[in-house]
Every structure is written in structure tokens, then in C-alpha cells.
């Protein structure tokens, strides 16, 4: 098997006396890995530790077999450019329109010329189906549109890995599909992704591996079929049956 | 024409020159307060704990002593003691500016804190340094939110500037006082001074309201539902 794009070893995080992440080590190849688990399981903390938005107390991370020395600011900033992050509540820059949101990273971080970055931004927005909404500001977009802008913003940086932290949990049921379609498209084009979600129908149809987390630990991992139908861990089975009831057919 | 009206008419050009002085003092102080207040706010929100402590003391100091005391302290105290040759006009701008920087820093700090923390996170996730994220993402939004608070600060500075008459700055109040004591037309002249202040407040806050509307982010309203 090829070397993993992203290797994560023993990432741990404590808040005060509470361990929210206890030595998680998921390995990520060119695939879509989906994190499931109850609230407070540490999925979001793990994702934020991966690009050091939350500083892990322990653990090491390699991207393309290069260890990330996050204490060196320059290394950290370079690494974050290669790791796209999608947030549950979009976090678009409210004072910039869709086009500017996508362009700003290229101009201000990569130092691209405005015109060139603008063309790329148009391309990315068209790719997520928002060619007609480029001049709109976040407050004028629907949740699904906002999330698609944020995906375009991440893609414009040419990331090697995308982290998606419950990208559809803040969306109306009707808007989930449009965001899923974009993510599906990315997966089909070979983008490496780690995504936390409760949408297990989507997860099982697309993921190469499901990782079940609880209480800061990875309890079980395997193919969607294994986790959803033949889980070894009783807790995994219990969680999966509850979530299937809630989020419907797989 | 009644005597009082004549007194006002006679003094008006002289008073209007004074309002120019007042405006320069106020705009200068606001500018200085902005130039110092914005970095102070950033430092107080994002800075090292030692820096935060220092800024908190700075704010406490400049908000805690009356303007008149500061003016005398600087002009008659410090400038004399260290043989610094500054005009009363310059001292007025510096002192009002320093005090305003303390107040403005709190306006900006409140605005920065009101932004969702996801804004900074998203900027960091793109690979921005904190300094870049603050200047490109945080401040442009925080400053927009600060305009209403700024309008408050303007009207307070405008009225505080009258106190600088105690140093002999030839602003509205000093001139009104000068003419009033010479002509014994106290009532019409102080009345005229008050009206000029009212008009300047009105024009300034109106202008800032227009600025607020101009920099409004599309999709957001500057008034309630």
C-alpha cells in the first residue's frame, strides 16, 4: 500500500482535567474517511487538532511523509494551506462577497495577483454550482450556498487533504443534498477527505472507511459494511442502530 | 435689531473661526485616538497576558483622571518641568487623543469580541498568520461595527474640547467668553456658542451615520426589524 498522505500518531488533547482526545491515530490514504460518534466523542477536536486550530498536547502528524513542525510558524502556515477545512457553521468572511471569500486566501496567503486569483475563484465557484451568486454576500446566501462557497474557498488553495467538520449539520434537510453532491464529486475526483458527520446514508455510500469514536478514543474502524452491519464493539452497534433510526435509510 | 442679535452677528465670524479650531482639535484627537486605540484593542484581545495587563492599566489611567487635570498636568506640569515647547493647541490634541484612545480601544475591543470566533479560525485554516488574519478579516469587520460607538465618541470629544479653553486654546468657548466679558453680552454669546456646538454635533453624527450606511455589509441592516 502507498504511504499515507496524512499520518496521525497519538493525538491527545486535554481541556483542564478533561481528556477530550486520547491518542487518536487515524491514517489517511487517498480516500474518504468518515468519523462518526456521539457529541463530545472528540471528532471535532480531532479534526481541529489535525490542522492545529486546536493545539494538541501530544501527538505527531506527517503530511506526505513530512513531519509537521507546528511550533515553526512558517511550517504551520504552509501546512494549513495544504489542508482545507470546512466548518459546521461555514465561517465565511461576512464582509466579503462569495468571490472575494474564495479569492482572499490566494491573494493574501499565496500572493497571487488579484486578476489571476479572481479567475480561479470564478472557476471554483462554478464548480460548486454558484456561478450566478458570486457577487452575493454571506448574509444573502442560503446555508447550502454558504457551505458550497466555503468548499470553493478551501479548494482554491489546492489542498491535499480536506477536513470536514459536520458540514451539513447546520443545514435544512432540503439543502443537505446540494452540499453532499459537491463532496461526492470531490471524492470521485480523488480528493482525500476526513469528514465528521451523522449522515450515515451518505457516509456508507461514499466512505472507504468509517471510524467510530467515543470518549476521545477510536473504538472501532472498518468498511461501512463492517461498521454498520457487523460491528464487533457493542457500543458501535448501539450507536449505529440509534443513528440509523434517526437519519433514516442507508 | 435687538442689541443681543447685533452682538451675535458681530461676534459670529470670530466664533466660526473658533469652531474651525474646535473641529481641528476634535478630528485630530479622534485620529490620534484611533491610531492608538485600534492597536490597543488588538493587543488587549489577542496579546500576551503581560501586554494585556499593561493595556488595562493604560485604559484605567486615561479614563480615571478628569480631562482638566490632564490638561494642566501636561501643559503647566510636564511641559514646564521638562522644558518642552508645545503650544496649548498641540497639547489639547495630544491629551484629548490619549484619553480618546483609551475609550476608543474599548469600542474596538467590544466590536472584536462580538465577532464569531469562527472568523479567526477560518482565516487561520487558510494559512494566514494571526497578524494577517486580524488586519484582513477581523479589523475590517470590527471597525464597521465600531461606527455607532464612534459617533458617541465624537460627540463627547466635541464637548470635552471646550475644556481646553482653560489652556487658552482659541476654540469656540474661549472666544465666546472673551467677547462676552468685553461686551457684557453674556447671554447671547454663550447661547450662540451652545448653538454652534449643537450644530457641530448634529453634522458630525449625521456624517457618521452616513458612513455607517456606506460601509454596511450587504445583507445586514443598520436598524432593527
Image (spheres, coloured by chain):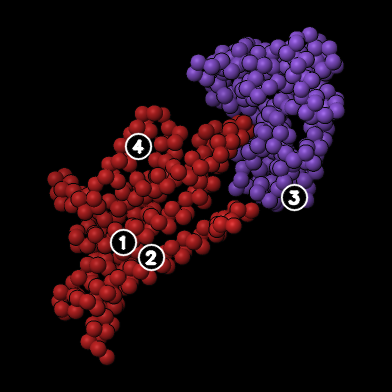
Chain colours: A purple, B red
Query: Closest to the observer: A167 or B141?
Result: A167
Q: Horizontal placement of B14 versus B151: left or right?
A: left
Residue carrying label 4: B55
Residue at 27%, 41% in the rendered image: B61
Residue carrying label 1: B159
Task: Give the Cα distance between marks 4 and 3.
Answer: 43 Å
**Whole-percent x and y of residue A139?**
65, 49
Task: Give the Cα distance between marks 1 and 4.
Answer: 26 Å
Q: Are marks 1 and 2 on the same chain?
A: yes
Residue carrying label 2: B201
Q: Quadrant of residue B181?
A: bottom left
Q: Which mark is residue A133?
A: 3
Secondary structure at numbered mark 4: helix
Task: Give the Cα distance between marks 4 and 2.
Answer: 30 Å
Few, some or many C-alpha atoms within 10 Å of disc 4 (few <14, some 14-19, many ≥20)? some
Few, some or many C-alpha atoms within 10 Å of disc 2 (few <14, some 14-19, many ≥20)? many
Amino acid at each position: 500500500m502507498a504511504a499515507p498522505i496524512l499520518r496521525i500518531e497519538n493525538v491527545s488533547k486535554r481541556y483542564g482535567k478533561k481528556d477530550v482526545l486520547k491518542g487518536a491515530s487515524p491514517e489517511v490514504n487517498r480516500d474518504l474517511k468518515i468519523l462518526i460518534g456521539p457529541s463530545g466523542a472528540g471528532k471535532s477536536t480531532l479534526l481541529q487538532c489535525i490542522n492545529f486550530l486546536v493545539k494538541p498536547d501530544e501527538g505527531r502528524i506527517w503530511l506526505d511523509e513530512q513531519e509537521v513542525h507546528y511550533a515553526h510558524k512558517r511550517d504551520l502556515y504552509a501546512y494549513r494551506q495544504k489542508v482545507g477545512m470546512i466548518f459546521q457553521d461555514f465561517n465565511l468572511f461576512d464582509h466579503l462577497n462569495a468571490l472575494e471569500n474564495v479569492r482572499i486566501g490566494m491573494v493574501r496567503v499565496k500572493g497571487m495577483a488579484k486578476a489571476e486569483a479572481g479567475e480561479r475563484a470564478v472557476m471554483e465557484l462554478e464548480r460548486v454550482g454558484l456561478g450566478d451568486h458570486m457577487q452575493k454576500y454571506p448574509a444573502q446566501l442560503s446555508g447550502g450556498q454558504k457551505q458550497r462557497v466555503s468548499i470553493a474557498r478551501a479548494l482554491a488553495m489546492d489542498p491535499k487533504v480536506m477536513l470536514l467538520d459536520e458540514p451539513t449539520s447546520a443545514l435544512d434537510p432540503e439543502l443537505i443534498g446540494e452540499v453532499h453532491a459537491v463532496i461526492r464529486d470531490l471524492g470521485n475526483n480523488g480528493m482525500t477527505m476526513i469528514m465528521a458527520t451523522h449522515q450515515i446514508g451518505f457516509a456508507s455510500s461514499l466512505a472507504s472507511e468509517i471510524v467510530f469514536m467515543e470518549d476521545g478514543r477510536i473504538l472501532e474502524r472498518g468498511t461501512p459494511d463492517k461498521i454498520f452491519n457487523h460491528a464487533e464493539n457493542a457500543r458501535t452497534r448501539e450507536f449505529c442502530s440509534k443513528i440509523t433510526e434517526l437519519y433514516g435509510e442507508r | 435689531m435687538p442689541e443681543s442679535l447685533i452682538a451675535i452677528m458681530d461676534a459670529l465670524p470670530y466664533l466660526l473661526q473658533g469652531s474651525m479650531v474646535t473641529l481641528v482639535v476634535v478630528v485630530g484627537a479622534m485620529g490620534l485616538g484611533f491610531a492608538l486605540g485600534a492597536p490597543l484593542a488588538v493587543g488587549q484581545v489577542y496579546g500576551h497576558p503581560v501586554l494585556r495587563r499593561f493595556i488595562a492599566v493604560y485604559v484605567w489611567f486615561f479614563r480615571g483622571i478628569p480631562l482638566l487635570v490632564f490638561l494642566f498636568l501636561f501643559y503647566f506640569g510636564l511641559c514646564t518641568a521638562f522644558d518642552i515647547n508645545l503650544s496649548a493647541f498641540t497639547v489639547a490634541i495630544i491629551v484629548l487623543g490619549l484619553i480618546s484612545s483609551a475609550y476608543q480601544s474599548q469600542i474596538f475591543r467590544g466590536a472584536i469580541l462580538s465577532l464569531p470566533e469562527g472568523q479567526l479560525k477560518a482565516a487561520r485554516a487558510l494559512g494566514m498568520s494571526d497578524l494577517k488574519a486580524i488586519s484582513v478579516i477581523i479589523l475590517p469587520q470590527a471597525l464597521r461595527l465600531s461606527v455607532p460607538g464612534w459617533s458617541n465618541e465624537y460627540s463627547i470629544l466635541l464637548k470635552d474640547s471646550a475644556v481646553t479653553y482653560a489652556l487658552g486654546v482659541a476654540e469656540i468657548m474661549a472666544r465666546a467668553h472673551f467677547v462676552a466679558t468685553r461686551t457684557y453680552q453674556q447671554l447671547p454669546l454663550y447661547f450662540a456658542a451652545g448653538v454652534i456646538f449643537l450644530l457641530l454635533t448634529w453634522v458630525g453624527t449625521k456624517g457618521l451615520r452616513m458612513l455607517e450606511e456606506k460601509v454596511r455589509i450587504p445583507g445586514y441592516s443598520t436598524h432593527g426589524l
